[in-house]
Amino acid sequence: MSSPTHQLSRKEREFYQREQLILDTAQEMLHQQGFAQLTMERVADAVEYSKGTIYNHFSSKEDLVCSLCCRCVSSLIELFKRAYDYNGTTRERFSAIGIAYSLYHQINPLDAQNIQVVKTNAVRDKLSDEKREEMSALEKEITELCMRIVTEAIEAGDIPHDDRHSPDSIVFGFWSMHYGAMLLAQSDIPLEKLGFSPVVNMLWYNSQKFMDAFDWMPLSESQDMDAEFEKLCSELFSDEICKMNLKG
Amino acid sequence: MSSPTHQLSRKEREFYQREQLILDTAQEMLHQQGFAQLTMERVADAVEYSKGTIYNHFSSKEDLVCSLCCRCVSSLIELFKRAYDYNGTTRERFSAIGIAYSLYHQINPLDAQNIQVVKTNAVRDKLSDEKREEMSALEKEITELCMRIVTEAIEAGDIPHDDRHSPDSIVFGFWSMHYGAMLLAQSDIPLEKLGFSPVVNMLWYNSQKFMDAFDWMPLSESQDMDAEFEKLCSELFSDEICKMNLKG
DNA sequence: GACATTTTTTGACGCTCCGTCATATTATTC
DNA sequence: GAATAATATGACGGAGCGTCAAAAAATGTC
């Protein structure tokens, strides 16, 4: 569906490009004016096509928003892949996944919320089967990427074998921790006022502790956690760090 | 606002009772038919008042849904208080908080989603200041309850002192882990099919590991984690366990 | 109990937005 | 250049939110 312009007819190319135009415009509107202001009419006006044409591309508003999410998750996967391919210990690679996650949501704070909106039953019910499958496929891909690192770590002996340490439990814990933290961070709960320190720091620290708990070598005690964070950031995500600093 | 019928005039009592009726009805509709089917008209029909009357109680649909959430969080706080008052180690009390959380969402799987819906900016923007404050007050209460246990644990020496182990970081980690896990659990991601074991088990296990990472005594290695889980369940939440088993 | 005044309830109405579909417009074929 | 196919359009029906003038009920006064 969202494959690049291979060898398509002019028609197909035009269709694909228009779809991207609609998505870009919708994303822009979503970021600028928020979900409530995103209406099909407005999108149609902005791209200078009629509503009917938009509906040739997306079967419903939910379908459009879900497509936006799919693009988000795809970008996230790109970052994850970079972490996966990093030439370091399994623990560093997994840590880098966590950083990628934080970073992504720092740069695109609204996306996490949209992803969560799409998971809402009210929205989910109105999606076409294809879109729902597109989304699951991406979720599957991203899960497997994480799972593979943990499996490698166990095989390499970086995580000592223990029947109770199944890879999926570790991935789930790490994932839920990050997922929860990001949602808490961009909800309107004033975490700082409740006494919490900056979220990304805490998340990094807690996730390192979490890995320590499984004796994932090398333990955080043997290294400077802050230095490690900065190392991974600069070696893997310097572009994104720039982007973030420009924004904030 | 939602205080019980103290010494109110008949008018005030009637008003309060009608509000509860509306909330009960709306909650029922939400659970039975889902968010999409919850309309102000339908609620009005069901309680046999007109729409205008509903709007005398709730300034908008969002306001109504947020009020439902506040009731949910209040129930959750009741469970948390039971955990807080438990006559056991600080670690057991904190663990019991986690169990209360799991249990609550096991019994009311849709509530977590509604709470998340309310946190959405699109909804949040339409809330009255009072409702938003009611919600924050509850969030503050629930946070402080958790924070107090951790602080006690540090003071009692159950968690060895370490400048990097601030109570808020520990609470945040524990909270985000649970929050994320519950949202993942009741989203449509088929966790089992992705290879994950049952969520509550993993969550319990991971949260114990998380506490171990801070050397929160007594460490899970020194005890049977499953037995501990069952002990806390039966001593604190046997009613809720029953309720859950009736449902599932 | 009858009348006046205040409070509460009502539902018709205006508005916005979604999604459809007959019609108009444009592109393609012969 | 006419016939046909493909595509775009926007008026329209329907649903739901929130309002508000008018109706109904409650309360107060004599």
Image (cartoon, coloured by chain):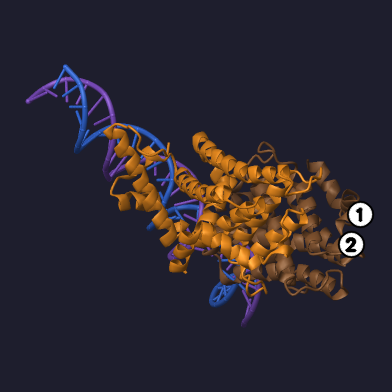
Chain colours: A orange, B brown, C blue, D purple
Q: Quadrant of residue B5?
A: bottom right
Left or right placement of residue D7 versus residue B88 in this view: left
Identified at 52% across, 57% down, the residue is: A236
Under mark 1, the amino acid is Gln
Q: A6 and A116: which one is in front?
A: A6
Question: What whole-number distance in Å separates the C-alpha atoms at marks 1 and 2?
Answer: 8 Å
Residue B57, x across and y down, in percent: 61, 64
What's the amino acid at mark 2?
Answer: Pro
Q: Which residue is mark 1?
A: B223
Q: Is residue B148 above or below residue A31?
A: below
Q: Position of residue B220 (x, y in %)?
A: 86, 56
* CB atoms of marks 1 and 2 within 8 Å: yes
Do we see residue B25 in this rendering?
A: no
Sooner in the amino-acid sequence: mark 1 or mark 2: 2
Residue B197 in which image quadrant: top right
Image coords of residue A16 (percent x, y)? 35, 39
Q: Which mark is residue B83?
A: none
| Chain letter of the residue beneath label 2 in the structure image | B
Comparing A137 with B56, the one in front is A137
The local crowd at label 2, few if under 14, some if 14 to 19, many if 20 or more residues have their Cα within 10 Å, is some
Q: Is residue C3 above or below residue A86?
A: below
Nearer to us in this view, B86 or B204: B204
- Mark 1 crowdedness (10 Å alpha carbons): few <14, some 14-19, many ≥20: few
Residue D22, image x, y percentages: 46, 62
Q: Is residue A16 left or right of residue B236?
A: left
Q: Which mark is residue B218?
A: 2
Which quarter shows the N terminus of chain B? Answer: bottom right
Quadrant including the C terminus of chain B = top right
Q: Nearer the viewer, residue A191 or A91?
A: A91
Q: Report whether residue B45 is seen.
A: yes
| Chain name for mark 1 | B
